[in-house]
């Protein structure tokens, strides 16, 4: 991604089919619809992925974002839900025990049911969007700022850059991710899903999306005071079960997880279903997913030339009911 000095960037969190909220947010940010495309005379939008699934207006959301990207008014990275869609439709290698990269289980089907229904009468349009998803980069390194859906793992990013010359991969890489021991699987799992750790003692928790999980989403960035317990390490809206919350972390586990330090460039992520009023995590780190599709807010950060993030640069609208 080439940074254009005369532009500012509006980084926008997970849309998840909330097209109405997206249009209201774009309007609030100063974008106007011209020639069927939302655009700004000086600024450019950057989407953090997860445009699809769960929400009421998935096709319209995709049309807004794709038209902006293709007409040069936005960039977008891939979210884990765009990857899931690709993986659902990609045949696994013949050596695999499964037929598709993403197993066709009832649980996986339920996650993309809203998207499947939205495109039930538009199969060719859906195939076109799958091709578009496949062309989305997994990350964007803009020099002074970076964007990735869930976690900037420096080693995995470097490996992708070495193999592909940037953040955009190919369909063969998607297919290779069927092997849980492969580099491709590590890349998609870490960059698009973050660091997920097992709950201690075989515990499980039911998330706000109704799914039962035996793992939790963990902080991946450097803290001034290193987390000491599982509750302090967690980064998700669902609380850690009481039996595990105060459990001490295994020695040195936290230092193995740190993927973003205080000296690193500005970093923007989505994915983590935050709630409340948008706030910085650190002066060089912001999460912009505030549960828009779950009655929360669709959030943007208005990036200028600042070297450290400013709390007043968050902009948001109330999103889907």
Image (cartoon, grey):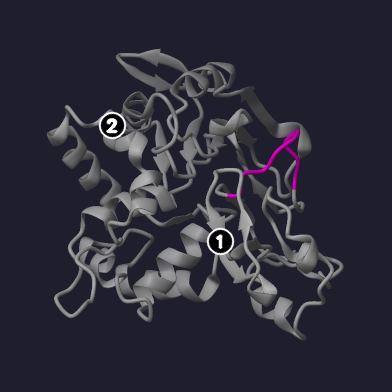
Q: Where residue 96 sits in the image (x, y, percent)? A: 22, 77
In the figure, residue 311 lies in which quadrant? top right
The residue at 39%/52% (across/down) is: 107
The residue at 40%/21% (across/down) is: 38
Secondary structure type for disc 2 = helix
Q: The C terminus lies in which quarter of the figure?
A: top right
Residue 278 lies within the magenta run: yes
| Marker disc for residue 151 | 1
**How crowded is the residue under tag 2: few (<14 C-alpha within 10 Å), some, or many (20+)?**
few
Q: Where residue 264 sits in the image (x, y, percent)? A: 67, 64
Secondary structure type for disc 1 = loop
Name the residue that disc number 2 marks. 117
In the figure, residue 200 lies in which quadrant? bottom right
Q: Where residue 209 sits in the image (x, y, percent)? A: 55, 43
Position of residue 112 relative to residue 140, above or below, is above
Camera-nearest residue between 300 and 251: 251
Let me know if residue 1 appears in the view: no
Let me know if residue 291 appears in the view: yes
- Magenta span: predominant SS is loop
The residue at 40%/38% (across/down) is: 53
């Amino acid at each position: 991604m080439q940074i254009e000095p005369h532009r500012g960037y509006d980084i926008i969190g997970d849309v998840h089919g909330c097209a109405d909220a997206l249009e209201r947010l774009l309007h609030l940010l100063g974008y106007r619809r011209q020639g069927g495309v939302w655009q700004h005379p000086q600024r450019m939008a950057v989407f953090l992925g997860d445009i699809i699934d769960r929400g009421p207006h998935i096709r319209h959301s995709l049309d807004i974002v794709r038209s902006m990207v293709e007409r040069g008014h936005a960039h977008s990275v891939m979210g884990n839900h765009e990857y899931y869609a690709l993986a659902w439709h990609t045949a696994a290698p013949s050596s695999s025990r499964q037929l598709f990269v993403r197993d066709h289980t009832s649980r996986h089907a339920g996650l993309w049911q809203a998207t499947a229904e939205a495109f039930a009468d538009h199969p060719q349009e859906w195939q076109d969007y799958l091709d578009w998803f496949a062309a989305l980069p997994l990350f964007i390194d803009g020099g002074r700022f970076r964007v990735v859906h869930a976690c900037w793992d420096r080693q995995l990013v470097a490996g992708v850059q070495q193999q592909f010359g940037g953040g955009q991969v190919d369909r063969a890489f998607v297919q290779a991710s069927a092997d849980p021991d492969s580099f491709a699987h590590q890349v998609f799992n870490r960059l698009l899903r973050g660091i997920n750790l097992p709950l201690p003692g075989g515990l499980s928790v039911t998330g706000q999306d109704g799914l039962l999980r035996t793992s939790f989403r963990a902080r991946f960035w450097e803290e001034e005071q290193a987390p000491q317990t599982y509750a302090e390490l967690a980064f998700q809206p669902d609380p850690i079960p009481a039996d595990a919350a105060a459990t001490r972390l295994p020695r040195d586990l936290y230092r193995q997880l740190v993927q973003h330090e205080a000296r690193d460039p500005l970093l923007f992520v989505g994915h983590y279903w935050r709630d409340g009023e948008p706030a910085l995590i650190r002066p060089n780190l912001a999460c912009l997913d505030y549960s828009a599709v779950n009655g929360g807010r669709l959030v943007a950060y208005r990036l200028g030339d600042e070297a450290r993030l400013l709390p007043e640069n968050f902009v948001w609208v109330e999103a889907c009911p």
